[in-house]
Amino acid sequence: QFIKKNNNKYIMSNLDNKSIDELKKELEIVKKENKKLKAVFTKCSEAIKELEGNSTGSKNKTSKKNDGKKEKKDKSKNNKKNDRKAKRQAELAKNKAKKKNKKDKTAIKSIEIEDKTVPGEKKIQTELPKKYHPKYVESSWYAWWEKQGFFKPDNTDESKPSYTMMLPPPNVTGSLHIGHTLTGAIQDALVRYKRMKGFNTLYLPGIDHAGIATQIVVEKSLMKKEGKTRHDIGREAFIKKAWEWKKQFGDRITNQLRRTGSSLDWSREAFTMSPELSNAVNTAFVRMYKDGLIYRSNRLVNWCCTLYTAISNIEVERIDLTGTKKMTIPGYDKKIEFGSIWSFKYKIADMDEYVTIATTRPETILGDTALAVHPNNPKYTHLHNKFAIHPFNGRKIPIILDEMAEIGKGTGAMKVTPAHDPKDFEMGVRHNLEFINILNDDGTLNENGAPFVGMKRYDARYAVINALTEQGLFVEKKSKEMNIGINSRSKDVIEPVLKPQWYVNCDELAAKAMKLVEDGELEIVPEREIGTWNQWLGGIRPWCISRQLWWGHRIPAYKVEIDGKAQQGDDGFDYWEVAESKEEALESAKAKFNVDDASRITLTQDEDVLDTWFSSGLFPFSTLGWPNEESLDFKRFFPNSILETGKDILFFWVARMVMQSLALTGKVPFKTVYLHSMVRDKFNEKMSKSKGNVIDPIHCIQGAPLSLLEETIKNGNLPDKEIKRACAANKKQFPKGIPECGTDALRFSLLDYTGQASDIALDIERVFSYRTFCNKIWQAHQFAFEFYGAKDLKVESASPAIDPANMHPITQWILDALNTCIEKSTAALDNYLFNDYTQSLYDFFKRQFCDIYLEVIKNFDQDSSDRADAKLALFTVLDNFYRLIHPTMPFITEELWQTLPGREFLPKDKLSIMVAPYPEVNSSWANENIANEIAQIYEVVKSLRSIKSDYNISAKKPKLFLVCQDATFSALLSKYTMMILSLTNSTELEISETFPEEEGMAKSVINDLLQSGIILKGLINFEEEITKLQKSLQKKEKRIKSLASTLSRPQIPDHVRAKTQEEHDRLVGEVEQIQKTIESYKALI
């Protein structure tokens, strides 16, 4: 047997008399066309083997003729059996494929359309493709925009108002994710809008060196490729490798930004480690130090024992534990227990008495320097001014009185470890306690941790518990709710450790920042985030800006030694000279210590680097030439107009920019802060690489099969043990991969999502739905050119005037609707209401222009004035709409706008839609009366459509009836008869005061004066329809019962429950509708 494809059907044929080559060819057809047909596949294989084994080859047919009759009979029987089986399998496969294709809404065949444009030149546009293809549409335009200089502002032009925005610099460590794309979509929409409104716009790009993140990935790469650590190759060689990484991966980010259409001025691209910005960082540090804002102090920091560095609060991920839980910690073979609290007894000196205290970190007992009780706690009055005996070193530690030891909480007594707990640190300062650090930088115990010196901190935890048990001092262990800090990068538990570091005193600057918002000098949008702003700044603490890294801005501070002896400062610690260069530091040290001979002075620069947020905090002005405040860019574009970023870094970055700008320029760095929500996956889970739900915008733009998504995960930086889990999660998230959505659809959908007050649960299917909207725009454009006739419309300018006064009412209406859309979209962008912006455009174009206007004008007579007016109206609507939506859909609008008539009249400086003027409201188009009339008529249309839909006769053209008791409204109905017929796909309408006496009339009440009706007799077999509906009803009720059973199980995951509930509720609604339809059919029989 073999199968071949003919007229899309599988036809069985006989293999007899076929050569080996012919059989192999047919076998390949089988393999290609349908892998399910195993029986046929096997038969083909057997036939080939049989013929190949015959010494006379395929030409020798003698052996077949000499086969016995029984063998032929058996073979014929088997062939028929295989024939029937293959047919069944083919039919099943065909049905399955139909079902699969029906469900897959994103299955669009991608085609290749050649673009012969030379990169940088204006796109060569021949005849537009019949359908919208993002890849073709997005080709060539960006390079032309960039080469034409459309992205560049003029810093000498004072005739235009300035509009400045900086791109929050993404980390150089990798590629952009969908959250970055949301930022870019919002920012570029604002920039393009302002550019079209005549502003001198600067949209400034940059990349952050991302100190800790970059050092981690470079170290991993070094270990993977060379099996070495950074310490093996030294600081200088390691920094060289970090620069190589920047060069390799920085271009990937800029390519992504170009692909997403961001109209950035690339001639001003900044990098936080460039010489210019590094100079600004040094200047800022020195000035803030000299102004008393930066100082060095021995305080608690967030210490990561895996990375050997202090980290910022933003890099600490807080995890809530409801009780005891064992967790995997870097550097430990076994899981470590958290969410427990251990109680033990302290012996009171010179008394036969013990005090029980509790701790979640037993290892820190080794650093205890006091016990604390509340001064008013009667339980411990007799212990005032007493001492306790440390269980391991016999040290006598004081019992202090402090209100932090709450009465009634636990035993009322608490241990105090000032060098390893923030609250204990404060008590230590208040009571002048000893600060004992028990940890080395790698998390092992130092000499202060005797007798457990050298042990890892969590190994020491259990050793301490065992030792306390042996001494009879251990009391009990309980489960406890608690919150622990995890380094979001290393996944290690953060240790509060006492370290001498550089700090910024933020108190005064924070107060000024709050006052700016209160006085309206700095606007925060949305306003609900002002509470967060005040909460953070109101409780601000000193900002630790030291990091124990190699990659970053090395702190411009120099430890001073004279004749080999370290000099002491007023605080009793080493003296540091702060200066922008070593030469300046040397001159300052000579003057400070009255030393003439420079050779006696040794300066050693601080090994630490500055927190990345310190340099990022300077970005609004360091990128514009500061500290040279006379530079043209600084004078023209500072302060920035707006900062747009995620609400999660309101304090960590935004507040610091404001404080540093106030300290260094005396000005607020931007006038407005717009904060968008966070992007999560469709199950509302936080996106992370380990979860496999991070979306690369390029994958969304050009599409990515599941295999590519998995390959991306495997080529990333995830540990091997996490790759499998991430791939499984990725498959669950994108079982069919990611469909090709295109840049315009992605940008539009992201802006549309901003209407949510909460975080964004991004669903790729919703993004894809806006690709269909792009196709709707494309098809409307094609229709317009066909409607013009001869694909041409004679116009005398690029934007000819249009007077709707004497035009058909429907044309007057669409111009009024366009006017309203212009008003709404402008107001939305001015007020950062991006969801209102996208919805006003979507509703106008799809629901008013396409669904109503285009459907009506199709029926205008070929040579009528109405049709001629409609041609000009079509051009006017498309020209204005493309300019309205351009800020969020730059590529499709440029592609289509360039093909409109009249482009030859464009001035040389307005050759692109991106520099064309944004539409403005036209008072001559406003027509409230027409808008009200059409609104009333459309209610009639919806009523008639509803009847046709309810009875499943949308494709049929029945006679329509409207019963109206008001003569004036009857006249209005007559005026718009053609519109009603066009929009209901009907050919006949009767308007009267009563319904005719006929059976099978389906009626609907529109309002007190008006009813609609359709005679269904002859259009529907009611008995058959009722039978069909009852069968459908049974299936849906059975499914509802199954879903209800699933929902009753308490253990199902939240995302499964939500999806199941959604289907359940939908089906319940469908069942109710079917039941109503059945009853209505019965009433009409």
Image (cartoon, grey):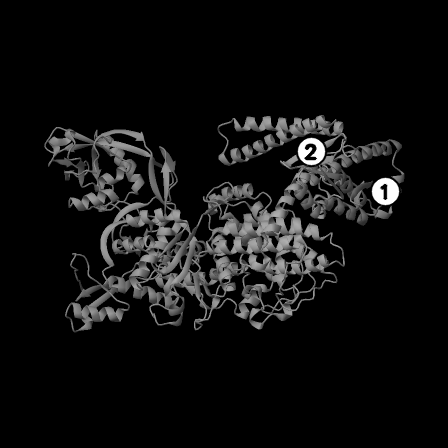
Q: Does the image show residue 674?
A: yes
Which of the 4 image quarters holds residue 572? bottom left
Quarter of the figure with the C terminus: top right
Q: Is mark 2 on a helix, strand or loop?
A: strand
Q: What element carries label 1?
A: loop
Tell me which label, 1 or 2, sits earlier in the chain: 1
Q: Disc 1 marks which residue?
A: 16
Left or right of 426 on screen, residue 235: right
Quarter of the figure with the N terminus: top right
Q: Where is residue 323 in the image (x, y as percent from the top left)?
A: 35, 32
What residue is shown at x 26% (from left), y 67% (from top)? Answer: 579
Q: Identify which amino acid the numbered label 1 is placed on.
A: Asp
Disc number lying in front (1 or 2) = 2
Residue 923's place in the image compared with 70, above or below, is below
What residue is shown at x 56% (from left), y 44% (from top)? Answer: 734
What residue is shown at x 20% (from left), y 46% (from top)? Answer: 436
780 or 143: nearer the viewer: 780
Q: Position of residue 1070 (x, y in %)?
A: 62, 32
- The mark found on residue 1003 in the picture is 2
865 or 383: nearer the viewer: 865
Left or right of 407 on screen, residue 113: right
Q: Does the image show residue 450?
A: no
- The mark found on residue 769 in the picture is none
Left or right of 769 on screen, residue 674: left
Left or right of 278 on screen, residue 732: right
509 or 459: nearer the viewer: 509
